[in-house]
């Protein structure tokens, strides 16, 4: 019995030792797992931190990408677009067959398979060498260069048999000049009748009957002024030192060439005459009230008569404390008549509605929500921009290249139709009919393209955004079919805003709202004169000379749209006003000569001091 009990004890002891060893192994494994868990927690924390940093970088890169995309050169090789368009025709062959039922309704880039297409001519080679310059309008300074042997001999022994003439383009210091305006004063002189009679009876002159020199006695007519002086020429502004030509030059350098006033000051110093920026500001301040009524009249006429106004806006910086504040510059291109700039601190529906109050017509703009209030009222009809639609499709090239290329190919053909119809020089009605006839099959292809890729597109991807933009703006994008006066893109207003973007890169910010107001006024006149192919410098100078003498109710006639007609109807006096003073100056022989001064002796110090220097 005791031996059996001892055997059980040994067995239990062995089992106990085995369990203890197992427990030690489990505890060791548990400790190792705790260490591994701590290490993983540390790695998780580091990975989470890195993920947050990467997420922040992605958000920053996304914002930078979206900010840079509008200025991105959205170009696709023409060959790729043509191949993509052929792929579209294969996918939607039904639409292509319907479109090619007759030659007039044929899709651009397609041809009947039964006919042999004429061989394409190779593109003309570009000319090489120096471009020919038109030198006919440059003043000529002739330089006569003879051989040294002829000069040494004085021409003796040589016969002139011909000349070899070549041309060079040079620049000499020019720019500002000083106009010396001399307005001489005259006083009426009348001798005493009795004194003149007695002198004649004695047979002697006044000077001979006296020992001292005497001035002729005068009689002043109470009905005549005591001193006569010519009025200031009408081409010059009173109480302003600058001639309108100099003011126009500062305006164009600042608002057409984007040269800040401090740079103009530096340039003037380099040319030998320092023109401080404070003086330039004074000139702009004097010109602004002359030009602002013209721009206001242009905007009023645009809102009352324009069929379609293209508009866009951009933000600008205005200096404030402690940092610059964001303002907004709006542009309104009314048909082919006026380009008007306006500014506001807010870009809201109320701001746009207030600016366009009274307008009844078509508004060509992007899909910004600030214009929705105008469209809901029913007085303004929305026209969307195909350039914006193309931009959304272009952004999908990185994620859905095939689908994006197909969409870009269709839109490219749409723009090609518009260009070809414009090149034919048709009237608006005929142009609209021809463009609509060729564009409808292409728009049908856009509908089919959107239907094909709508379901397969990633809801968060750029292709879905492009299709969503088309779905939301479809009616407005198709509205150009209704009238030939409607454009398919809003490039006219975007190009007009390019100047303020480039200018802000030079002057960084506007000093205050006054500077922004000046920009909107002067830039409106410059952009409108460019629209009507006027010489901006000549127009601005002549307009500034004429506007002080023009009737206020008729200031619209001084707008660039009407300037050619207005200038042709000017009378002789008004033509003299717009002529520069150095061209209106009288010839020296036509000036009134002063009567000879009466003196006892040419050496008289009293009289000599009063004589003007020769």
Image (tube, helix red, strand yellow):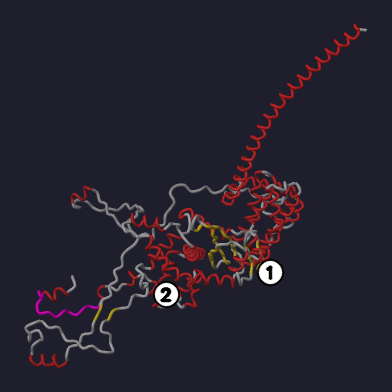
Along the line of sight, which residue is nearer the eye, 518 or 231? 518
Q: Callout 2: 10 Å neighbours few (<14), some, many (20+)?
A: some
Residue at (45% x, 76% y) in the render: 569
Closer to the camera in the image, 297 or 491: 297
Q: Nearer the viewer, residue 339 or 162?
A: 339
Residue 254, quarter of the rendered image: bottom left
* Element under disc 2: helix
Q: Main secondary structure of the magenta part?
A: loop
Q: Which residues are magenta?
A: 592-604
Q: Is residue 302 visible?
A: yes
* Percent coordinates x, y for residue 393 in the rendering: 66, 50
List x then y, in percent, for residue 174. 33, 59
Q: Is residue 379 magenta?
A: no
Q: Are marks 2 and 1 in contact (CB under 8 Å)?
A: no
Q: Is residue 302 left or right of residue 94?
A: left
- Which label is found at residue 378? 1
For the point 46% across and 70% down, which residue is it?
291
Question: Considering the numbered disc 1 on the image, is that residue within a helix, a strand or a loop?
Answer: loop
Residue 507 rendering spot, x and y as whole percentages: 46, 55
- On the image, numbered disc 2 is attached to which residue? 548
Q: Against 467, is 602 above or below?
A: below
Residue 2: image quadrant is top right
Q: Residues within 10 Å of mark 1 (few under 14, many from 20)?
A: few
- Which image quadrant is residue 29 in? top right
> Does residue 157 lie above or below 188 as drawn?
above
Q: Left of 19 or right of it: where is 218?
A: left
123 relative position to 231: left or right: right
| Residue 602 is inside the magenta segment | yes
């Amino acid at each position: 019995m005791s031996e059996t009990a001892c055997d059980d004890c040994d067995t239990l002891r062995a089992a106990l030792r085995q369990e203890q060893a197992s427990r030690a192994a489990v505890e060791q494994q548990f400790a190792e797992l705790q260490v591994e868990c701590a290490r993983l927690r540390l790695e998780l924390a580091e990975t989470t931190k890195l993920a947050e940093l990467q997420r922040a970088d992605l958000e920053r890169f996304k914002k930078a990408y979206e900010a840079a995309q509008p200025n991105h050169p959205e170009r696709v090789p023409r060959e790729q677009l043509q191949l993509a368009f052929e792929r579209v025709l294969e996918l939607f062959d039904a639409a292509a067959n319907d479109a090619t039922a007759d030659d007039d309704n044929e899709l651009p880039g397609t041809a009947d398979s039964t006919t042999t297409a004429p061989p394409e001519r190779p593109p003309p080679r570009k000319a090489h060498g120096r471009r020919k310059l038109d030198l006919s309008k440059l003043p000529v300074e002739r330089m006569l260069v003879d051989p040294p042997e002829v000069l040494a001999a004085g021409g003796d022994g040589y016969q002139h048999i011909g000349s070899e003439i070549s041309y060079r383009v040079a620049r000499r210091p020019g720019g500002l000049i000083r106009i010396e305006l001399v307005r001489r004063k005259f006083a009426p002189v009348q001798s005493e009748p009795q004194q003149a009679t007695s002198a004649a009876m004695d047979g002697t002159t006044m000077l001979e009957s006296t020992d001292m020199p005497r001035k002729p006695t005068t009689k002043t007519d109470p009905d005549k002024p005591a001193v006569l002086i010519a009025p200031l020429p009408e081409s010059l502004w009173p109480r302003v030192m600058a001639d309108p030509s100099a003011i126009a030059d500062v305006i164009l350098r600042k608002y057409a060439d984007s040269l800040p006033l401090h740079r103009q000051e530096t340039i003037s110093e380099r040319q030998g005459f320092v023109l401080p920026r404070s003086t330039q500001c004074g000139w702009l301040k004097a010109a602004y009230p002359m030009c602002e009524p013209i721009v206001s009249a242009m905007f009023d006429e645009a809102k009352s008569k324009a069929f379609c106004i293209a508009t866009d806006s951009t933000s600008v910086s205005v200096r404030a404390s402690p940092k610059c504040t964001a303002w907004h510059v709006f542009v309104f291109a009314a048909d082919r008549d006026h380009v008007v700039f306006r500014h506001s601190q807010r870009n809201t529906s109320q701001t746009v509605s207030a600016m366009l109050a009274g307008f009844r017509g078509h508004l060509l703009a992007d899909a910004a929500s600030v214009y929705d209030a105008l469209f809901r009222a029913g007085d303004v009809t929305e026209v969307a921009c195909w350039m914006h639609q193309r931009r959304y499709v272009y952004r999908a090239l990185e994620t859905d290249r095939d689908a994006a290329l197909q969409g870009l190919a269709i839109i490219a053909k749409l723009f090609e139709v518009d260009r070809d119809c414009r090149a034919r020089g048709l009237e608006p009605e005929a142009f609209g009919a021809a463009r609509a006839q060729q564009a409808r099959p292409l728009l049908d292809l856009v509908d089919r393209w959107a239907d094909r890729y709508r379901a397969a597109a990633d809801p968060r991807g750029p292709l879905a955004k492009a299709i969503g933009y088309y779905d939301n703006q479809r009616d407005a994008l198709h509205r150009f079919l209704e009238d030939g006066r409607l454009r398919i893109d809003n490039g006219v207003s975007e190009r007009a805003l390019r100047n303020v973007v480039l200018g802000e890169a030079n002057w960084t910010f506007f000093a205050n709202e006054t500077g922004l107001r000046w920009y909107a006024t002067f830039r409106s006149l410059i952009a409108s004169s460019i629209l009507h192919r006027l010489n901006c410098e000549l127009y601005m100078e002549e307009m500034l000379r004429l506007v002080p003498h023009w009737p206020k109710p008729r200031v619209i006639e001084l707008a660039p749209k009407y300037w050619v007609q207005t200038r042709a109807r000017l009378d002789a006096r008004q033509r003299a006003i717009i002529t520069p003073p150095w061209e209106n100056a009288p010839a020296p022989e036509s000036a009134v000569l002063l009567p000879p001064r009466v003196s006892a002796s040419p050496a008289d110090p009293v009289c000599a001091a009063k004589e003007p220097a020769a």
